[in-house]
Image (spheres, rainbow, N blue to C red):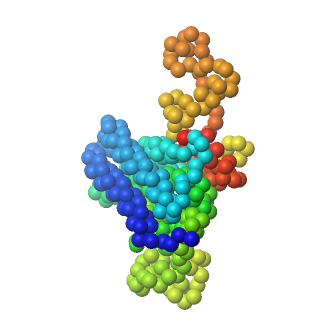
Amino acid sequence: MAVVTQAHAAIVDAYGRSQQRAVIQTTVTMERLWKRLAAADLSASWLQGLGAAMVRAVSAGQLVAASTGQPYIEAMVRMDGLSNDYLEQAARVDARSFSGVAADGRTLDSLLYLPVIRTKTLIGGGLTLQEAMLSGQAQLLRMATSEVADAGRGAAGVAMVANRSVTGYVRQVRAGACARCAILAGRWYRWNADFQRHKRCQCYGVPATEARPGRHTNPMSFFNGLSRAEQDRRFTIGGAEAIRNGADIYKVVNAGRSTMTLDAYGKKVVSTLEGTTRRGEFYQQMRREAEQKTGQRFARTGADVEQGLPRFHLKTPRLTPGEILRLSEDRDELIRMLKRFGYLS
């Protein structure tokens, strides 16, 4: 069995720092762009280019965060003295699949416009312009932080599923972890378990292998290592007091995350619109498959339509990685579905 070494810790720390940098760089850019919005007409200045710039900034942050996932997983596997084990033609995580779309499947522009709506609503409700703008900015930065971090976790999760040397992962929490994350600190999850997180969550997974199953941490150890003031701040005064008096820490803290769903495949599923336009990679992948299956060539251009070629109409919702994890019954099926929906190539 492999021993957890300083080299392992260095890889994990380097990955954690890379994720933090991606978040910080993105939020700095978003704050600068938000301050350029014209207070006299927020919507107009958003539509005149600032909104698009914000979408590009978050997309870039997502791509940076996602691109480090597979190298991180592979480095940990090699450090355990194992080979990275992939199925043929399913060995590369496409980091671009995690960029340009929100974690819940909606487009980034619709998500990032919400702080503008909130700001205008607060002004209409009587807040000063400064108060409303600060509130909108805070919401925007929370969103940017969550979306970049989710992209990083999502790509790393797909890398762990694809790499069959990985048996699971252990939740890594940062020093400033909230109560909801603290109770999950050090918990081991199977390779196909979706990562539980909340808005602005900065935790991530440390891959485990047969050679290094991972170290388990009792969340009470984390709690007891905090000062009384920090216990009260993170777990609330009442919650911390209850825990100090013997209450179950898991029952005191309740972690959860809402999702957006649609009806497909005879059930409610979480899907994304990313990559499903005519220029999108998933759309083009499904069009190629339909052509191979039917022998019918579909139109690419207006000229093709004029020549009588039919347009391809995408009817397959693109599932998110988390939904694929939930629906798959075994690892091979999970890998096939991740490949089918464009997250592995």
Does any portion of residue 194 appear in the rendered image?
no
Residue projecting furthest to the bottom: 245
Residue that appears at 60% across and 15% down: 309
Residue that appears at 44% across and 83% down: 225
Residue that appears at 51% across and 40% down: 274
Q: Quadrant of the N terminus?
A: bottom right
Does any portion of residue 288 appear in the rendered image?
yes
Residue that appears at 65% across and 19% down: 296
Residue 142 drawn at (x, y percent) = 40, 58
Residue projecting furthest to the right: 266
Residue 191 drawn at (x, y percent) = 60, 59
Q: Quadrant of the C terminus?
A: top right
Q: Is residue 226 left or right of residue 287?
A: left
Residue 281 drawn at (x, y percent) = 52, 34
Residue 77 versus residue 30 in the image, above or below: below
Q: Nearer the viewer, residue 195 or 86?
A: 86
Asked where in the image residue 47 lies, by quadrant, the reply is: top left
